[in-house]
Image (tube, grey):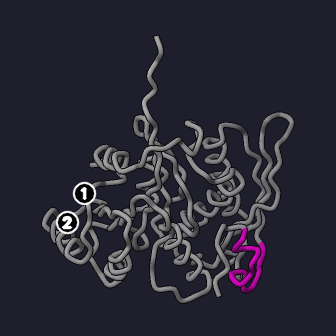
Amino acid sequence: MTETLSPQSCGLIAVVGAPNAGKSTLVNALVGQKVAIVSPKAQTTRTRLMGVAIEGDTQILLVDTPGIFEPKRRLDRAMVAAAWSGAEGADVIALVVDGKGGIGPKVMAIAEGLKHRREPKYLILNKVDIAEKERLLGHAKRLNDAVPFEEIFFVSASTGDGLPELKAAFARAMPLGPWHFPEDQVSDATERMLAAEVTREQLYLQLHAELPYASAVETEQYKEREDGSVEIHQQILVARTTQRAIVLGKGGQRIKEIGARARAELSNLMGRPVHLYLHVKVKENWDDDRGVYRDMGLDWVE
């Protein structure tokens, strides 16, 4: 008796929104494990990153884009350009909105940018676990009046509320076609890129407002050891000597803690021991260095 294989489906969802709407948390939750870094700091995501989720016979490619905002610096312009280009060729554009916050000019500007796009558009109101119901319904009406959405979802990426329904709807919207990635692959990021992102996340989590957006992480060396472990050498770029002192901490304690937590997370994500070596370099105007943009996966924007 011949076994009948179910036809596969595969498609791309562009996840867009203002900074801090919860896009990365949502992508991680739908994939089922961490593929994008998360912090309470706005604009944590700097580049396009794809998470791969599976629902039955459907593979859903979720493009987590940087938050869209009014750019002031070259890095800002590159991040916003990456966000809009991440929506190109998508089967669905999903606008994620912080349901607890207000619908201000930033969100309305993004909605206006979506109005004339031909891709199907879904509205996802996030953080319903901490938002008032009347406020959520008001947000939904106002945004739907501005941009007719095919579907509207009320979810909490952090608690999982509404996510099974959202994931099922995403799967239904995907076209028939072969999967683009093996079943066990959860992201298009290389381990080298992932290592830099995890360290950058620890900078945000541990330094909070002490270190603004004036930092970047470059993976200088990445090599496999014979015992199966990985050796990673990274450079943390800052713009000023005072920022270097902040990252190092008193007696070098802060950078040791950053390294220890990043190492533990990378070992867990990669499933093998990681030897992580960090050093901090002062590089004025690093955000005008084409090489830094290339390493971050961003296009150079004039």
Residue ranking furthest to the top: 1
Taking the image as drawn, is residue 159 in sight? no
Mark 2 is surrounded, within 10 Å at the Cα level, by few (under 14), some (14 to 19) or many (20 or more) other residues, namely: many
Rendered position, 115 above or below 169:
below
Q: Is 14 rendered above or below residue 76?
A: above
Q: Which residue is mark 1?
A: 154
How far, Cα to Cα, is label 2 from label 1? Answer: 8 Å
The reply to whether discs 2 and 1 touch (Cβ–Cβ < 8 Å) is yes
The picture quadrant where one finds residue 78 is: bottom right
Determine whether, in the image, residue 222 is placed left or right of residue 244: right
How many C-alpha atoms fall within 10 Å of the one at disc 1: few (<14), some, or many (≥20)?
A: many
Percent across and percent down for residue 31 are 46, 46
Residue 247 seen in this snapshot: yes
| Left or right of 292 in this view: 28 | left
Residue 59, percent across and down? 47, 43
Relative depth, front residue between 151 and 137: 151
Instruction: Tell me the element at label 1.
Output: strand
Q: Amino acid at mark 2?
A: Leu
**Image-based side of 168 in relation to 195, left or right:** left
Query: Mark number for residue 136?
Result: 2
Q: Is residue 18 above or below residue 71?
A: above
Q: Nearer the viewer, residue 292 or 243?
A: 292
Residue 292 covered by magenta stretch: yes
Residue at figure coordinates x 58%, y 61% from the top left:
201
In this view, the residue farthest toward the left is: 134
**Residue found 73% across the figure and 64% down from its top:** 252
Q: Residue at x 29, y 64 (%)?
A: 123
Range of residues picked out in magenta: 281-294
Element carrying mark 2 = helix
